[in-house]
Amino acid sequence: MTRTILIDTDTASDDAVALIMALRSPAVHVAAITTVAGNVPVDQATRNALYTAELCASDVPIYTGAAKPLLRPLETATWFHGVDGLGDHGFAPTSRTASPIHAVDALIATIHANPGIELITLGPLTNLALALSRDPSILPHIGHCVVMGGAPCCEGNVTPAAEFNIWVDPEAARIVFRSGLPIELIGWQLSRFDAVLNPADIAQIEALATPFADFTLRSNSAAQAAYETQTGEVGISLPDPIAMAILLDPTLNLTSTYHHVEIETASELTRGMTVVDRLSVATDERNRTLWSETTRHAAPAEICWKLDIHGWKSSLISVLS
Ligand code: BDR
Ligand code: CA
């Protein structure tokens, strides 16, 4: 049976590859794409989503959402993905335009129209936090929510404590994690080391010589260089496509456990940290008060710890063929 999904994205280079995977997958029907400010300003994210949908000959509706985090100024990642988010090669939509409806309204309407819909968030959680705050009645209609974000129990990519999507809008992330949504968390660390497309993987993708393969490599050129500078690892790291691969094929999530997660919003040092109650001590007497807002409403989130590396790369290569 085809599953219905909605993708919320701050569309830059790795987001775009995730969009290709979903738009070309027979396993899912993409009911809507909503864009949010993050990697790039929101209008650029919308342009990038439109370009990617055009490449896939998809007429999926695309809605522009929040232009800034709930309480903070926007801080982009153009230093990583390029000024246009797609490596600055001039990729621009030629025929499609975005819907005039705001993404938050579209999220609410699409969820009500598709009970049981699955969400996947590939950027800061601003749109989803706004939708949940404006219309909490959407909550029971969301069947599953894959969140690409966080650095559970490890170092982040923006600060030692935090990963970009959560760090950009920690207040929004806190609302989402406290909401009671059935969250599957795909942290940044899953896209490192062996999960990185190495030179042999890149050569294999290049040899496909399809428009999708070509776009994947070119749009990620700036990100590839920035990732090597940041981590010393050579190759293309693709956090959002890994989250999408797991959504499309849940068996790629090899090991996961369920825990309460809190988001740090007050500290400058650890802003946006995903604090995972890995030993399930949140409800112990000594922690009960501090964690009460989390444990009161939210079920534990599923935290993915281990990815099927071979399965992930095979799924990507097959969709780019
Ligand atoms: C996340 O941050 C963004 O730069 C990527 O698109 C991905 O969603 C990785 O930390
Ligand atoms: Ca993203």
Image (spheres, grey):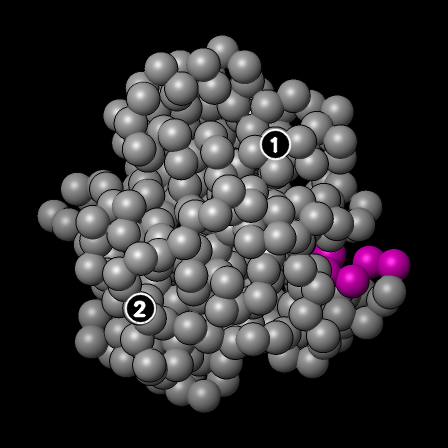
Cβ of disc 1 within 8 Å of ligand 1?
no
The quadrant of the picture occupied by the C terminus is top left
The residue sitting at 48% across, 48% down in the picture is 90
Q: Main secondary structure of the magenta part?
A: loop
Seen in the image, is 188 located left or right of residue 10?
right
The residue sitting at 59% across, 23% down in the picture is 235
Disc 1 is placed on an element classified as: helix
The dot on residue 224 is 1
First in sequence: mark 2 vs mark 1: 2
Which range of residues does the magenta coloring cover?
269-276
- Residue type beneath disc 1: Gln
- State yes or no: residue 163 in magenta: no
The residue indicated by pointer 2 is: 97
Q: Nearer the viewer, residue 207 or 236?
A: 207
The dot on residue 122 is none
Seen in the image, is 184 located left or right of residue 100?
right
- Residue type beneath disc 2: Thr
- State yes or no: residue 272 in magenta: yes
The residue sitting at 43% across, 48% down in the picture is 91
The residue sitting at 42% across, 61% down in the picture is 47
Seen in the image, is 256 located left or right of residue 102?
right
Q: Nearer the viewer, residue 284 or 215?
A: 215
Disc 2 is placed on an element classified as: loop
Position of 172 relative to 274 (above/below): below
